[in-house]
Each structure stands twice: as C-alpha cells, then as structure tokens.
Image: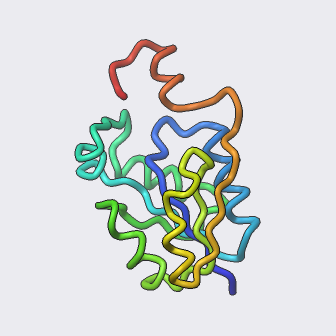
C-alpha cells in the first residue's frame, strides 16, 4: 500500500482544498492529512474561522481523506513520515523546495500546482473578515 501525506490549515474548506486532496490521493492508496492545530496556527500568526475540531470533522467527511492527524509544529514532518510509514509527501507548489530534505529520508516529495483563482485568504478578504 502506497501511503501519502499532506499538511494544511484547511480553513473555510473550498474547491481548491478538494482539488489538492484529490490529487494527493491519486498518488497513492491511503491519504493522511496533517491538520494545523489551533495552537500551531497561533505560532504561525494565523487565526482560523473554524476550530481544529470543526476542520477535522469536515476533512474526515471527504472521501479522499483516510486519516487526519494534528500538526503541532514545523519539525514534526520528518518524524511523521516515519511514524505513519509514508511513501509520498505532498504540498502545494507555493512550498517548492522547502521539504526536499525529506528525499534524504527516502520519501518522494511532490509539489502540486495550486488551483487558480481560489484561496482562503482571498475568500476572507472578500467577505470582510479579520481572519488572516
């Protein structure tokens, strides 16, 4: 079984999120999603509209997602790929090169193109919220 992992905040779930989850799942048989915890978002200077528990519930309802785990810090990615027996690490292409160090761990690293014209930040700006 080929196991894939990706990470994100997945706030205000939209079709861009669904696209990356679908494309990530197409790269293997089992998709693990590392979901940024509320505490980690605070460290990153982000505030989500939905809580971790709410975002987790939404992700678990998506047919492409097999497992959701908390992402609590930047460093855990190296240990997660081993803990969850990951073969493929997937991120959006806005992160190109940032996780290439995982190749040294024997992990395939794939950067997928973002879905054009959609982002949570843009949605929040358009609806006039202060969550960024």
**Left or right of 15 in this view: 105:** left
How did the renderer colour the structure? rainbow
Q: Position of residue 129 (x, y in %)?
A: 38, 18
Q: Residue at left 35%, top 50%?
A: 52
Q: Residue at left 62%, top 68%?
A: 109
Q: Residue at left 70%, top 38%?
A: 115
Who is closer to the viewer here, 65 or 78?
78
Q: Is residue 124 above or below residue 24?
A: above
Question: Which quadrant of the view contains residue 103?
Answer: bottom right
Q: Is residue 36 above or below residue 84?
A: above
Q: Position of residue 48 (x, y in %)?
A: 35, 37
Please state, as top left, top right, bottom left or bottom right, where the N terminus lies in the image: bottom right
Who is closer to the viewer here, 92 or 65?
92
Who is closer to the viewer here, 38 or 117?
117
Please state, as top left, top right, bottom left or bottom right, where the C terminus lies in the image: top left
**Left or right of 23 in this view: 129:** left
Q: Position of residue 75 (x, y in %)?
A: 33, 67
**Left or right of 89 in this view: 54:** left
Q: Residue at left 46%, top 22%?
A: 124
Q: How many marks?
A: 0
């Amino acid at each position: 079984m080929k196991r894939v992992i990706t990470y994100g905040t997945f706030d205000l779930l939209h079709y861009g999120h669904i696209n990356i989850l679908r494309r990530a799942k197409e790269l293997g048989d089992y998709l693990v999603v590392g979901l940024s915890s509320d505490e980690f978002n605070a460290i990153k200077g982000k505030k989500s509209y939905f809580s971790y528990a709410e975002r987790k519930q939404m992700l678990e309802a998506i047919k492409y997602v097999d497992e959701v785990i908390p992402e609590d810090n930047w460093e855990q990615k190296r240990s997660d790929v081993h803990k969850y027996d990951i073969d493929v690490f997937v991120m959006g292409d806005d992160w190109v090169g940032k996780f290439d160090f995982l190749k040294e761990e024997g992990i395939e690293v794939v950067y997928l193109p973002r879905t054009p014209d959609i982002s949570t930040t843009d949605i929040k700006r358009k609806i006039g919220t202060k969550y960024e």
